[in-house]
């Protein structure tokens, strides 16, 4: 679903800014909301979400505000009603960590390009 700005804001280059949506939700246990950038804003105006996807957990009850970052060279104006982000609701599995020794694998601790090109 689209998230819209509830008030105007000017995004200065390289200055993250919280943009309010006027929306608050109550998620059931086992669900999260993920806030993601809009592709059109990213492509046409270099506007992104620096922590994207942002996570809203089921215990949060405050207003959803989106951290927007202008990676462009010029200020960008957000108007009230503009679509600024997308949000999906996703199920997740809660786990309980158990400390143990890890089993061997063919990859081992290799990372950052170790599995091929």
Image (cartoon, rainbow, N blue to C red):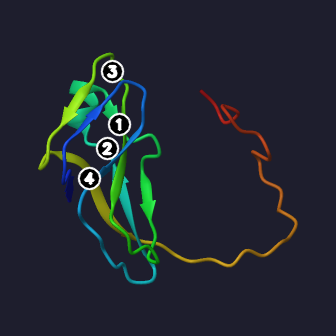
- Label whose residue precedes the other's in the sequence (2 or 1): 2
Q: Residue furthest bottom?
A: 29
Q: CA distance from mark 4 to mark 1?
A: 11 Å
Residue receiving disc 1 = 48
Element type at mark 3? loop
Element type at mark 2? loop
Q: Position of residue 16 (x, y in %)?
A: 42, 37
Q: CA distance from mark 4 to mark 3?
A: 20 Å
Quarter of the image for the N terminus: give it: bottom left
**Which picture quadrant has residue 79?**
top left
Q: CA distance from mark 3 to mark 2?
A: 15 Å
For residue 86, which numbered disc appears in the image?
A: 4
Left or right relative to 58: residue 104: right
Residue in the image at 29% along x and 58% along y: 87
Q: Is residue 59 above or below residue 6?
A: below
Q: Say if mark 2 contacts mark 1, CB within 8 Å.
A: yes
Q: Is residue 117 above or below residue 7?
A: above
Left or right relative to 116: residue 76: left
Q: Say if mark 2 contacts mark 4, CB within 8 Å.
A: yes
- Label whose residue precedes the other's in the sequence (4 or 1): 1
């Amino acid at each position: 679903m689209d998230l819209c700005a509830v008030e105007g804001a000017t995004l200065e280059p390289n200055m993250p800014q919280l943009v309010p949506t006027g929306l608050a939700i109550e998620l059931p246990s086992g669900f999260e909301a993920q806030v993601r950038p809009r592709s059109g804003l990213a492509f046409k105006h270099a506007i992104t979400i620096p922590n994207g996807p942002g996570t809203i957990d089921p215990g949060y009850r405050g207003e959803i505000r989106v951290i927007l970052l202008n990676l462009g060279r010029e200020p960008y104006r957000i108007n009230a009603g503009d679509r600024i982000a997308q949000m999906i609701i996703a199920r997740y599995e809660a786990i309980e960590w158990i400390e143990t020794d890890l089993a061997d694998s063919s990859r081992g601790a290799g990372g950052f390009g170790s599995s091929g090109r």
